[in-house]
Amino acid sequence: MRTARRSRKLLVAALGVVAAVAMAAPASAHVVLQSTEPAPSAQLRDAPKEVLLRFSEPVELPDGAVRLYDSDGTRVDGGARAVVRGESVALPLDRIGLGGHVVTWRVVSSDGHPIRGAFTFRVGTGGSAVGDTDALTQRLLAAEGGDARVGGLLAAVRILTFGTLVVLVGGAAFLLTLWPGGWDDVRARRTLWTAFGVVAVTALIGTGLQGAYAAGLPIADSFRSELFVDAAGSRFG
């Protein structure tokens, strides 16, 4: 009985640690945007051939990672996809017009947490690079902020996945090393198979949610095939 109570306490402690790690992971991102080309608020004579963002470490790109808008809020990058160049991200541009422009970006750090931001620049003389686009910048950022419920649900699923992994791996290790005869126990086998099933299901759900979370999309988009494939091929996946 004493051993059983000690085992339950250790399991509860392990689950507590897993929950703390899973909940803290989304807040542990430390990627920093170091510089951009064009520079924020830059006033350019000629239109740039690309937008370049340099980060403090390599990042991953969700769908629509970098976008360019004109002063009317119309997307003017032609739907081009950004590409990773080491620790930099580049958005190729064809031809953009004169006036103020807003660049919005959303990338995924090594821990699977998305970070985002925006900056402005102006092509041509006259006017301000920021003044007439500041409100637009805030509106675009708010529109691309994603659904907070996705992040909350993803955290809950990760806690369930990691917590069940404690039961699955720890239980299997216990049977292998301390109670070999336990493989013949119906309850022990049922516990392990149930844990395996929960891990498998929550891993699939978590991968879908990660795709939507990274791209800033609502829960309804969690199982879009292209987002699921992107998430499965990422470090998180």
Image: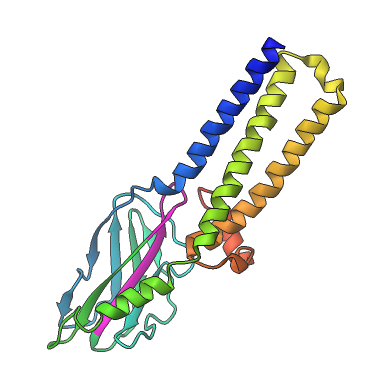
Query: Quarter-wise, where is residue 36 in the image?
Result: bottom left
Query: Left or right: where does residue 168 sit relative to residue 208?
Result: right
Query: Left or right: where does residue 39 sit relative to residue 50?
Result: left
Query: Quarter-wise, where is residue 102 in the image?
Result: bottom left
Q: In the rendered image of this protein, does residue 21 appear above or below residue 203?
A: above
Q: In the rendered image of this protein, does residue 198 appear above or below residue 173?
A: below
Q: Residue at x 63, y 42 (%)?
A: 161
Q: Residue at x 82, y 22 (%)?
A: 183
Q: Percent position (x, y) of residue 228? A: 60, 60
Q: Nearer the viewer, residue 187 or 84?
A: 187
Query: Left or right: where does residue 132 sit relative to residue 4?
Result: left
Q: Nearer the viewer, residue 232 or 28?
A: 28
Q: Nearer the viewer, residue 202 or 235?
A: 202
Q: Residue at x 60, y 38 (%)?
A: 162
Residue 211 seen in the figure: yes
Q: Is residue 27 found inside the magenta-colored segment of the image?
A: no
Q: In the rendered image of this protein, does residue 38 appear above or below residue 3?
A: below
The residue sitting at the left extreme is: 126
Q: Percent position (x, y) of residue 84? A: 39, 60
Q: Nearer the viewer, residue 80 or 219?
A: 219
Residue extent of the magenta highlight: 100-115
